Image (tube, helix red, strand yellow):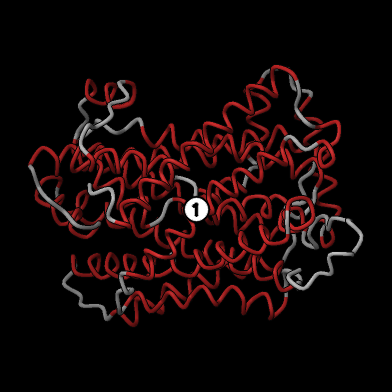
Amino acid sequence: MAGMNPDQADELRRGLPMVEARDPEALSQEKQLLARIETRPHFWQRWQGYWGLSGPGWVQSALTLGAGSASSAIFAGAVYGYKLLWVQPIAMFLGVMMFAAIGHQLLTTRARPYDVFWKKLHPSLALLWGFNVFLASVIWQFPQYSLGTAVFQDIFAVFDVNMPKGIIALILLVVGTTICWSYERGNRRSIRVFERTLKYMLMFMVVALFLVVVKTGINWGQLLRGFFSFHIPTDKQGITIVLGQLGAAIGVNMTFLYPYTLLARGWGKEHRGLKNFDLGTSMFFPFVLATSFVIIACANTLNMQGIQVKDAVDAAHALQPLAGLTFGRLVFSLGVLSMCLTTLVIEMLICGFVLSEMLNFEFHGWAYRISTMIANIGIIGAFYKLPLWLPVIVSSFNLIMMPVAYIGFFILQNKKSYLGKDVNRGTRGTIWNIILIVAILVVAAGATIKILSVLGFWQS
């Protein structure tokens, strides 16, 4: 794609040679099942049918629930207690609405988004988007290995076992690669196994964090105020946290990953209802539940005791005397470890997708596998910290690219030459556009504050 002749015919590349080409009978049966589900008279009956077919949303949850989400939720709960519980639901709602628009475009045209950005927007925008996604997926692999290794070591330390970092990093690498490469087989069964593996890991994470909350107790009055009072701190530190969480619940690499996971499943117009259900149950709720449980657990313990922590390992140690060894340190650590491992797998998958598109090879074979392994340069993070300037530069690039990507999809959402009669008009189109504009403004505000902080003009 990067070397594409601009004079080529404006024919978009559509679909992926995965389920659609390798398992067409299974896809046909799925469409027939969806048609029967759509005839059910009550929404809960349709939802029951959708549950067994959902999947791409779990992949997004696995990516966004990583070391960054864990750290920000720990800090929010430790410093502000229950007060910032409202932030993550609002942030993810805006993200889900943008993803609903991206999904609408994808299911309507079934065109590969990188190709769409190249031909319908501008080649330089496609290159910038792809490069940023690739860079983010490599750099953000470092904290997954770093925190994952530290938490894994701490879990073994509970049983007085000193596990070397090298062995733990190798375990993370082997497990992550095994799960990631199962996706490359490209038939419906392998992709469903991949999605369900992530689903069960995420469900384990949510249950583990819920058990910590149960053990520490819940202040129901503060819980309700935390979700519905929309408290905004007046100090710069609090404002930075709020805007950062609002702007970073969705990463720029997720804007690339999501439409390709839909294409990999062979989804089309018949899957629109399933797409919306999947975004709600597999992306919105797992993220909100997991981050809320972390905030509540830290609010119940660290905030009330005035304990200062730097990371998830510190938080687990602080929880131990307050919530008990098993529920405090061990279970909390297992929940955080699940966050790191699932994100590690998805960063590999994204590298495979983006390099396949930018270098114009298909999503299978050794070229694809090698491209996924490039993300694992991040294994160095298990042993050495990144130079401070590197994540700052990468974060700044991605913060700038995030509203740009959103604006690109917003333009495409209203581009009749692209969507034809499926462009949303009237009241529905107006409401959707207003929500998307709010989402763009939020990520732009978050990006602005963070960049000003990096430049020293906004000190929290």
- Measured as percent of width and height from the top left, residue 385 is found at 30, 74
Read off the residue under disc 1. Answer: 400
Q: Residue at x 32, y 24 (%)?
A: 230
**Front residue of this view, candidates 122 and 277:** 122
Viewed as shown, does residue 174 lie left or right of 154?
Answer: right
Q: Quadrant of residue 125?
A: bottom right
For disc 1, the neighbor class at 10 Å (few under 14, some 14 to 19, many from 20) is some
Residue 12 in percent (x, y) is at 84, 55
Mark count: 1
Name the spot of residue 133 as percent of width and height, x first.
56, 62
Residue at 28 percent across and 38 percent down: it is 239
Which percent across, then down, holds residue 220?
24, 23
In the image, 134 versus 215, the foreground residue is 134
The kind of residue tagged 1 is Ile
- Could you tell whether 140 is left or right of 375 in the image? left
Secondary structure at badge 1 equals helix
* Quarter of the image that includes the N terminus: bottom right
